[in-house]
Amino acid sequence: MKETVDILISEKAIAKRVEELSEEIHRDYINKDIYMLCILKGGVIFMVDLARKLPGNVELAFMDVSSYYSETKTSGEIVVNMDMKEDISDKHVLIVEDVVDSGRTLNFLIRHINKKNPASVRICTLLDKPEQRDVHVEIDYIGFTIPDVFVVGYGLDYNQRYRNLKYIGSLKFDLY
Ligand code: IMP
Ligand code: MG
């Protein structure tokens, strides 16, 4: 089975959108330090690009959760592989995700984070795939809304590959 990747969102379009999002976030967090919480591994490239565009105080933090287990479909179960290290009780948490699909991962994360009594929690996702949503989640910042296709690149993977692509592409399997 051969895989092909078709460009869905170009490097240039991503850069433009990241810039716009950073301006929006900057306006919303005036006089507030941001605790940027990257959901590994998919959110990492988006987070560093976004963080570098923000002129204010930004703390970088990481959490690793699993929900996909090397498959293109969710298992429904979310496991925390690595929790955040900091006490977030006075912090303004901005969750940075790669993609919201069923919404189960984010729903779990929001409840997990709220138990730690942060000052606020907001969500920023690079991609939103609303077609297969099972759980409603309120997303504050969305990079791009896309149809229900499996995408790779700019942090997103298929079996740990393609994360380093500069663009976002849709992954196709050619059967022959
Ligand atoms: P959800 O819990 O169904 O919303 O799944 C969200 C997680 O599934 C994301 O953080 C990704 O890690 C993964 N995921 C969902 N769709 C894609 C995709 O198209 N490409 C790569 N990973 C995906
Ligand atoms: Mg993810």
Image (cartoon, rainbow, N blue to C red):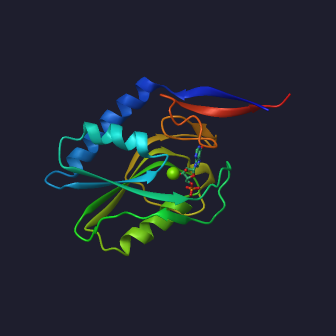
Q: Position of residue 13 (x, y in %)?
A: 42, 27
The residue sitting at 47% across, 57% down in the picture is 64
Residue 75, visible in the rendered structure: yes
Q: Position of residue 65 (x, y in %)?
A: 51, 59
Identify which residue, 24 or 118, lies in the foreground. Answer: 118
Identify which residue, 104 or 155, lies in the foreground. Answer: 155
The residue sitting at 17% across, 46% down in the picture is 56
The residue sitting at 64% across, 43% down in the picture is 159
Left or right: residue 131 versus residue 137 is right
Whether 142 is drawn above or below 90: the answer is: above
Whether 137 is drawn above or below 2: the answer is: below
Q: Position of residue 121 (x, y in %)?
A: 33, 62
The residue sitting at 17% across, 56% down in the picture is 32
Q: Position of residue 46 (x, y in %)?
A: 40, 40
- Spot the residue most to the right: 176
Number of labels in the image equals: 0
User: Looking at the rendering, which quadrant does residue 91 occupy?
Assistant: bottom left
User: Looking at the rendering, which quadrant does residue 134 occupy?
Assistant: bottom right
Whether 73 is drawn above or below 111: the answer is: above
Image quadrant holding the C terminus, namely top right
Left or right: residue 30 versus residue 107 is left
Residue 21, visible in the rendered structure: no
Image quadrant holding the N terminus, namely top right
Left or right: residue 73 versus residue 46 is right
User: Looking at the rendering, which quadrant does residue 112 occupy?
Assistant: bottom left
